[in-house]
Image: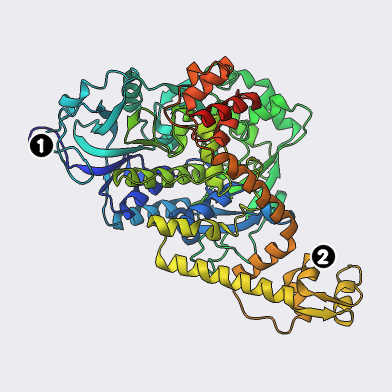
Amino acid sequence: MGNSGTGEAYDVIVVGAGHAGCEAALASARLGKRTLLLTINLDSIAHMPCNPSIGGTGKGQLVKEIDALGGEMGLLIDKTFIQSRMLNRSKGPAVHSPRAQADKMRYHIEMKRTLERQEGLHLRQGEVAELLFEDEGDGSGVGSGVGSGTPDEADFSAGSVNAAVSGLGGKARKIVGVRLKSGTSYPAAAVVLAAGAYLGSRIFVSDRSFASGPGGFAPAVELSESMKAAGFVLRRFKTGTPARVLASSLDYEKMQEQKGDEKIVPFSFLNDEAGENKISCWLTYTNPRGHAVVAENIEKTAPYGGYTTGVGPRYCLSIEDKVSRFPERERHQLFLEPEGTDTEEVYIQGMSTSLPEPLQEAFYRTIPGMERAEFSRYAYSIEYDCLDPQRLTPALAYRGVSGLFCAGQINGTSGYEEAAAQGLVAGINAARGLDGKEPFVPGREEAYIGVLIDDLVTKGTDEPYRIMTSRAEFRLVLRQDNADLRLTPAGYELGLASELRMERCLAKKTAAETEMARLRAARVGAAQANPLLSGLGGAPVSGTISLAELLVRPEVSYEALGAIDPARPMISAAAREQAEIEIKYAGYIEKQKKQIDKFRRLESKQIPPSIDYLSLEGLRLEARQKLNAIRPASLGQAARISGVSPADISVLMVVIKSL
């Protein structure tokens, strides 16, 4: 390193080791890129500062897709869960979503171990204070370097590049590395920025605030300030977390026990079985007495007292928001989640607040079962800086700065799963970009990951974004159970999904298709079918009927059909599930596939990247401005932009045909 303060050169540097950064770094290294993962504190790797769980409605689908592509989150939660449930079982398979309580400390340890053992990945504690750029095509201070255009160590120093970081100023730039708070600079050809909720973050408790990252870890203050100085436009979002209390201080007899599933569905498609449930969760409820404590002191909370300015999440309200917005409600549900098997701490989901700490105690102790609750950590609100995701391409590259990718909460999202999904895509595309390959951009008809990214870069978000099944218009096709069939071939082609994973995917596909063909061909008479149907409350049949036709009936399950199906082969539970869903919902699935075909026709109509929207007089002014800012790749994406009307799309179609 000499006296220059310049460290080793890397192909890809990932800033931040939260759930986005971990997936990005692993993907980059597994695709053969020399990767450096930098984090302010190694003890915060894959930290869970909010609820100690992975998955949930919509989120579980993301985790299954991450796994199908060859990511890590599904494998780790299967190793470290302490309770697992499949949500929404009473509804159709389109919204079945796995969710698992994590042993949060074990999850952190397992992820840290995975990172440390990954070939080509260097894990290091260090706070990034500055992103280093140069003007595109300038070439000053940059040599041939290590791999794929990485700047040469000998010609690289913070001083030689810092002059370029005076503001984006509309100029095209390229990333050339990062500078740490310690002064050391690391050259790189690509950087994935995954700073999470640490960027310029401040914690608020009533009228008091202080610079801090989540969970008491240090914030990234200098990076936030240097990005502003470089011309990045940052926004202010906020979120909050409830208090933690000790399990031994709770009276569970006053609560409702929530056990895990008897038959556990693993997150990873590499696992046929997972472990066992080790804990129960518990339900309890707020009451008017507690609501009165909040209402009488609401001006003492950070948002209602005017102490915070950030925009909070609509779908994860604080208790003060619940009491204020829904005064007619006499109670709100609280979900108590143990944080691990080696700790007494219990997370109180549904009760985030920024009340003063003595008032938090007064309020929490009005809750049945929490009258003598002993607090280990108090609740707080946290504000942080983030980017406008509409400044990103669908590959999660920052427009105007080649080599810079952004993932996770810095893009305006909330949740570990949303972050991990973006990190995986950003890491893949950082690596592929260095090889001159086309980016990996899953479509919204192919994956929840595609829905997430398309929503962010096309529609943007004015609040912390959360994935939900309702956001996916093709959710019957994008089920959690078939994520491997949808995405593992792509993961294998990318070089992330292993040979074993691909073999398992193909075996499941073949077994399910063979079984569906058998069920459609096998027929039984009324003498066999009607006793079964009578026992299940179904209408009788006359003549013969195929097993598939019986399975279509809502009262008949694949398992129940076994009573009249002696020729049934031994196939995996996953293949059986696939066959049952595909037969039972065949009509609906076929209808959705036709909708997807129509969707893809619009997506296939590419828009030339050089098109000058501002000069197209046939478009309304708002449409011109929006299209110019977002630069959609296709007519389909253009049609999803807020402020672009069907009439504007018609004009665009005419323009494209004339080019």
Q: Nearer the viewer, residue 205 or 37?
A: 37
Q: Position of residue 601 (x, y in %)?
A: 59, 43
Q: Nearer the viewer, residue 600 or 362?
A: 600
Residue at coordinates 33% horizontally, 29% vertically from top-left?
401
Query: What residue would you read off at disc 1?
Result: 154
Q: Is residue 498 above or below residue 159?
A: below
Report the number of numbered marks: 2
Query: What residue would you read off at disc 2?
Result: 555
Residue 241 visible at all = no
Q: Position of residue 428 (x, y in %)?
A: 38, 47
In the drawing, does residue 68 fall left or right of residue 154? right
Residue at coordinates 23% horizontally, 22% vertically from top-left?
164
Q: Nearer the viewer, residue 551 or 414?
A: 551
- Name the colouring of the figure: rainbow
In the drawing, does residue 10 fall left or right of residue 438? left
> In which image quadrant can residue 611 be found?
top left
Residue type, mark 1 in image: Ala
Residue type, mark 2 in image: Glu
Q: Secondary structure at mark 1?
A: loop
Residue at coordinates 41% horizontally, 58% vertically from top-left?
493
Measured Cα–Cα span from mark 1 to mark 2 = 72 Å
| Disc 1: CA contacts within 10 A as few (<14), some (14-19) or many (>=20) | some
